Image (cartoon, grey):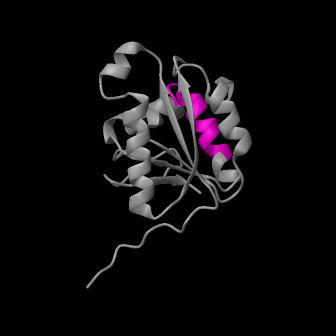
Amino acid sequence: MSTTKKPPSPSNCYGYCRVSTGAQRESGLSIDDQQRKIQARCLEMGWELAATFTDAGVSGSTPLGKRPQGARLLAALRPGDTIICSRMDRMFRSSLDALATIQSFKKRKISEARVRPLDRAREHRLVAQVTGKEQVGAVDLTGDPVKPCQLLVGG
């Protein structure tokens, strides 16, 4: 009988939510929907959610560290912590911001997790934008092969 090994419990687990428009609030990307998904992932993983940081009405093109709650989140993080967001585009729209921030997370031993399984095509495009070349098969921002339901990046 095989068992699925869960990642170790993080020191602190933080949620991050963002919507930029009223239309997003109505389309299933509402703050409440994102928070429910984050809480469900924590429950599934056996993690305790320390806090959720929410930027409402903030464009995803604004770098995470320049958003009011994004900056507070980044300041709160310590080695061993994990951030959960419902989708990668809730944290990043800029490929360069995503790459720089996730590299910073890796150096600081911080993990980023998504509720939604990876969109291989979107992840592939993001890597192609950052590296300037197409990759054979989808890879995540660390260069590792992406599995369809891989959750943790970095850490």
Which residue occupies 60% across, 43% down?
Answer: 102
Which residue occupies 29% across, 81% down?
Answer: 2
Quadrant of image for the N terminus: bottom left
Q: Quadrant of residue 65?
A: top right
Across and down, in percent, residue 134 comes to 40, 36
Vertical arrangement, residue 6 with respect to residue 27, above or below: below
Q: Residue furthest toward the bottom?
A: 1
Across and down, in percent, residue 113 comes to 48, 49
Quadrant of image for the C terminus: bottom right
Across and down, in percent, residue 53 comes to 58, 36
Q: Quadrant of residue 75?
A: top right
Q: Is residue 134 magenta?
A: no
Q: Quadrant of residue 55?
A: top right
Can residue 71 be seen here? The reply is yes
Q: Residue furthest toward the left?
A: 1
Can residue 132 be seen here? The reply is no
Q: How many marks?
A: 0
Q: Nearer the viewer, residue 89 or 9?
A: 9
Which residue occupies 37% across, 20% down?
Answer: 24
Left or right: 23 with respect to 127?
Answer: left
Question: Magenta region's main secondary structure?
Answer: helix
Left or right: 48 with respect to 67?
Answer: left
The residue stretch that appears in magenta = 92-104
Vertical arrangement, residue 56 with respect to residue 140, above or below: above
Q: Nearer the viewer, residue 92 or 132?
A: 92
Which residue occupies 32% across, 36% down?
Answer: 121
